[in-house]
Image (cartoon, rainbow, N blue to C red):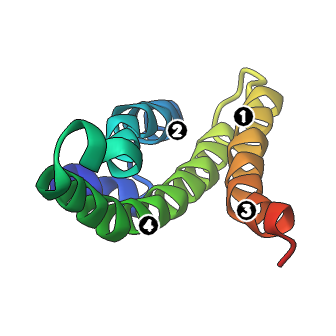
Amino acid sequence: MKMIKDLWRGEITLWKSYWLCGVLVSILQSPLWLITERGSELFGADLAFIALAIVVFTVPLYSVVWSVGTWRSATNYLEVADTEPDGRLWKRRKYAFLAKGSIIIGWTAPFVITGW
C-alpha cells in the first residue's frame, strides 16, 4: 500500500514510476485481458468472470493512479534538475516531457481512434 501511496504522490523516481509501475505492470496484466477475451472457452466461465471483474474495477483505477503519479514524478524530476549544477537540466526536461507526453497520448488516443 505504501508503494501505491508513494506513486500517487510522485515520490517514486521517474524511471521506476514509468517503467516499473507503468510498463511492467501493463505487461503483467496482459494475461487478465486474455482470460477475459477467451476465458470461458479456455478456463471456464467462473475464471473469466473473476478476470473480467478485476479488469473492470482495478485497471481503470490503477491507470489513473499511475498517470497522476508519473506526472508528479516528472514534475519532481524537473525540480531536482534545477538544483544540479552539472547541466543535466536538458536531459531531465527531455525525459519529463516524454513521460508527460506519453500520458497525454495514452489518455487521448482511445477517444481519437473511436471518433469521440
Q: Amino acid at mark 1?
A: Tyr
Q: Position of residue 33 (x, y in %)?
A: 40, 46
Extreme bottom residue here? 116
Q: Nearer the viewer, mark 1 or mark 2?
A: 2
Q: Amino acid at mark 4?
A: Pro
Estimate the spatial distance between the alpha carbons at disc 1 and disc 4, rounded to whole Å.
Answer: 25 Å
Res 1 quadrant in image:
bottom left
The structure residue drawn at horizontal position 47% and vertical position 41%, both measured from the top left corner, is: 22
Estimate the spatial distance between the alpha carbons at disc 1 and disc 2, rounded to whole Å.
Answer: 10 Å
Residue that badge 4 annotates? 60
Give the class, few, some or many, for how many residues have Cα within 10 Å of label 1's Cα (few <14, many ≥20). Answer: some
Extreme front residue here? 41
Q: Position of residue 67 (x, y in %)?
A: 54, 59
Q: Earlier in the sequence, mark 1 or mark 2?
A: 2
Give the class, few, some or many, for how many residues have Cα within 10 Å of label 2's Cα (few <14, many ≥20). Answer: many
Secondary structure under tag 3 reads: helix
Please state, as top left, top right, bottom left or bottom right, where the C terminus lies in the image.
bottom right
Estimate the spatial distance between the alpha carbons at disc 2 and disc 3, rounded to whole Å.
Answer: 20 Å
Secondary structure under tag 4 reads: helix
Estimate the spatial distance between the alpha carbons at disc 1 and disc 3, rounded to whole Å.
Answer: 24 Å
Task: Indicate whether 20 appears above or below 10.
Answer: above
Q: Earlier in the sequence, mark 1 or mark 4?
A: 4
Q: Nearer the viewer, mark 1 or mark 3?
A: 3
Q: Amino acid at mark 2?
A: Tyr
Q: Earlier in the sequence, mark 4 or mark 2?
A: 2
Residue that badge 2 annotates? 18
- Tell which of 100 and 76 is nearer to you: 100
| Label drawn at residue 110 | 3
Secondary structure under tag 2 reads: helix
Residue that badge 1 annotates? 95
